[in-house]
Amino acid sequence: MRAFSTWRGHAGCVALAMFLLVSCSTVPPAQDESQLAGSPPRYSLVFIIHGDGDYLYHDTLGRARRADKDVFERAQAIATGLPNADVVIFHEIERRHVLFLIPRHDGRAYYYRRGRLVAQESYWRDQGDSHFAPEAKLYKQFAGAQPHPPVRMLLYFGHELPEFNGLGYDESYPKRRVTINDLAEGVKNIAGESEELDLLVLATCFGGTPHTISALAPYARYIIASPENLHLSYFDLEPLASIEVGSGDADIAAFADRFARNAFDQLVSEVQTAISVVVYDVSATGAFRDSVHAAYARTLTAANGTSLAAVEHCDCASDSTYARPGMGRGLTVLYRAPRFGRMKHEQRHSGWECWRIAE
């Protein structure tokens, strides 16, 4: 009996070890020449999908769904349909444990090359404050000896990225800080030699603020974001399925406009709350951002020193501190007022969202 117990214990350890090895494996290797044959990809797309939070919602049929998993599946479908692209998908998930004791990796990465999944890997996200360093490292690692095509577009899906404080963004790490500056640093490191993305899509609530656009401005020519609440339908990815687009300003601007309008039209057909989707031509917005920088920084400092109940979002045009001539320069604003509530008669939005101290 004792020998049997000992054997059973060893078998259990072996099984657990095999389970852990499989859960962390990279299959198949990214350098498999048979899968990388053909003309090299012309561009890269990067998806970062945050899933370490409350993303549960119910669709129109009452079915429970997870928004981050829905986006992940749609990103996978896009990746398999792009024969001329590298696509890397990062899914940041909640922390889990094996047998309630052994922690498991809290990130998953998938590398598609010319429409084929050639590598996938589980990884540890930053255990301290987030700087997206593991994602940047994996992005560079996946291609190995293969030359990286330029990063054309990066899409981030998640909750509102804080502009100050940042505690509690991840449910698994309540003491960990995540801010928009962390994402900006991650974009910089992922883009690498590409230096400047053609398009950055920020699928979060309250992404269209002067500070957020300024933080990302050095790394993108165009940014699509929502200055108000963004419904969990997020942005429709369908335009990415036909992404054959040139690198000139006119080409990128036309694609950004098509992507934004497609997302807006889908949201209009599905939800009754306010809908706002804005395309920011980054260089053209610089004058406005510079003009409100000092005032906005003072507001963020004051907000960081008080409770969230004492601050509120507002359309920048409704506050004399931020309302400036030319604030609409470089913006394509798509807005529909909510179908109910006190804001249902507000038919316009400036495209900029600001913080103010509540009265």
Image (tube, rainbow, N blue to C red):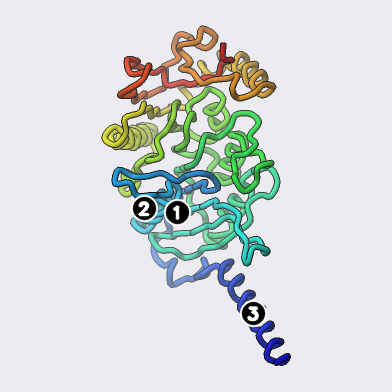
Residue at label 2? 78
Give percent across and percent down for residue 57.
Answer: 41, 44
Classify mark 3: helix, strand or loop.
helix
| Left-right relation of 193 to 252 | right
Earlier-in-chain disc, 3 versus 2: 3
Q: Residue at x 70, y 92 (%)?
A: 1
**Residue closer to the observer: 183 or 91:** 91
Residue at label 3? 12
Earlier-in-chain disc, 2 versus 1: 2
Say which of marks 3 and 2 sits in front: 3
Q: Residue at x 32, y 33 (%)?
A: 271
Classify mark 1: helix, strand or loop.
strand
Give percent across and percent down for residue 24.
Answer: 59, 66
Q: Which amino acid, mark 1?
A: Val
Earlier-in-chain disc, 3 versus 1: 3
Given contact means CB atoms under 8 Å apart, are the residues at marks 2 and 1 in contact?
A: yes
**Residue closer to the observer: 303 or 286:** 303
C-alpha distance separating marks 3 and 1: 38 Å
**Residue closer to the observer: 168 or 90:** 168
Q: Is residue 336 visible?
A: no
Residue at label 1? 87
273 relative to 148, above or below: above
Q: Which amino acid, mark 3?
A: Gly
Given contact means CB atoms under 8 Å apart, are the residues at marks 3 and 1 in contact?
A: no
Q: Which amino acid, mark 2?
A: Ile
Q: Residue at x 45, y 12 (%)?
A: 317
**10 Å crowding of disc 3: few (<14), some (14-19), many (20+):** few
Say which of marks 3 and 1 sits in front: 3
Identify the image quadrant of the C terminus.
Answer: top right
C-alpha distance separating marks 2 and 1: 9 Å
282 relative to 126, above or below: above
14 relative to 116, above or below: below
